[in-house]
Amino acid sequence: TVLGYFLAGENLAGLFIEVYKIATNPIFMAIPLFIFAGYTMAESKTPQRLVNLSRAMIGWLPGGIAVVALITCAFFTAFTGASGVTIIAMGGLLYPILLREKYGENFTLGILTTTGSLGLLFPPSLPLILYAVIAGNAYSSITGMPGVTVDKLFLAALIPGILLVVALSIYSIFVGNKIGVNKTKFDWKKLWVALKEAKYELPLPIIIIVGIYGGFFTASEGSAIAAIYVLIVEVFIYRDISIKKDLVRVIKDSCVLTGGLMVIIGMAMAFTNYLVEKEVPFMLVNIMKEHLASKISFLMILNVLLIIICMIDNFSAILVVVPLIIPVANSFGVNPLHLGVIFLINLEIGFLTPPIGLNVFISSYRFKKNILEIFRATLPFYIILVICLLLVTYIPWLTLCLQ
């Protein structure tokens, strides 16, 4: 970014203007607060309580514990926005359980690596919020209309997100039936005990979603409510987090991640402005129009490019790429909300794509396995995600029916 500004003869003060814009944009307050809430939950016994509850509810299904893994990991990724946190926090808990239930190591590695990014389509996912802000700014600069807002994108992503979870659950049940994994008998008493254990954590997503869509508070205010709620529950009610021993460390870790993220966001926004100033988006529009004849061919090429691009950090991909593809997609008549869901699914797939899919490296580190072994293990899940991506891409109703 600095090199681009320097070669173009631009004032380098423009870089810090973008950092200032971040500091004065209310929506960005949601990022550090949701990160803190996610870190606090990951460091507490919340993962164990959620696994116990999910197992009591659906453990009787063939493949039930695998579906439990899908749902609990999706929940965690939605709150942390980072696949690494989910794989590290949930992997150690679920890995021995899945192996003990007679799942093979390949399946276990594959599902835990895949579920690390499964929650990106569910509120209050940080990449989803960030996409709404960046795409909303880019779209309004073209049309003069917002086009994308956080609440609209939450709704647009809901059905596609459920589709991904259901598709992977069906595959998990199929594998469970095939290898004859142990089934646990449904027990109302165990379910009641699990519900009582998790009774303070379960209302959180309901409070956030109802609050935002009911107009009771904004996404930024919702993040503050989530942070305070989680702090009270984990520190003062469950007492999983010690004020003296743990709280300062959790705050420090979440602040380090937030600080690094803000540097990335500030520089990426400055780089995007540089590209816009050099009319790169308009050149891309012209090239696409010249070589692509239809909306269908554009979407196909877009998916291929996005899977490659989204192998990098998800926040960087959103900040740098979204402002470039918005004008191109708009010229082909692609709804910006539909485009957002396509982009976020590509992010999930990009985390699993060789040679630099981030989830694969985190799993390799967490489970002490060879990179190639992890890649092979994720292949069936990868194929399922790609099929779901094609369905969402070419059936816009899935994203727009709730608008």
Image (cartoon, rainbow, N blue to C red):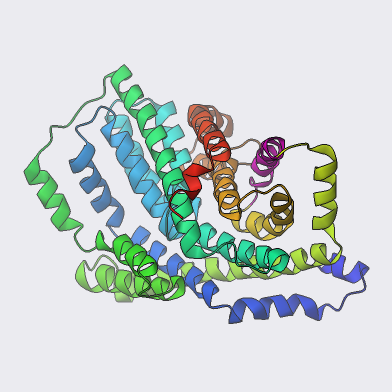
- Range of magenta residues: 295-312
Is 171 situated left or right of 58 in this image?
right
Residue plotted at (27% across, 67% down): 234
Snapshot quadrant of residue 317: bottom right
In this rendered view, identify the residue nearer to me: 368 or 63: 63
Residue plotted at (52% across, 34% down): 391
Residue 145 percent location from the top left of the image: 63, 67
Is 238 situated left or right of 336 in this image?
left
As for residue 308 lying within the magenta part, the answer is yes
Snapshot quadrant of residue 159: top left
Residue plotted at (34% across, 61% down): 41
In this rendered view, identify the residue nearer to me: 295 or 88: 295
Q: Main secondary structure of the magenta part?
A: helix
Residue plotted at (58% across, 45% down): 342
As for residue 299 lying within the magenta part, the answer is yes
Q: Quadrant of the N terminus?
A: bottom right
Count of numbered labels shown in the rendering: 0
Residue 222 percent location from the top left of the image: 39, 72
Residue 16 percent location from the top left of the image: 73, 79
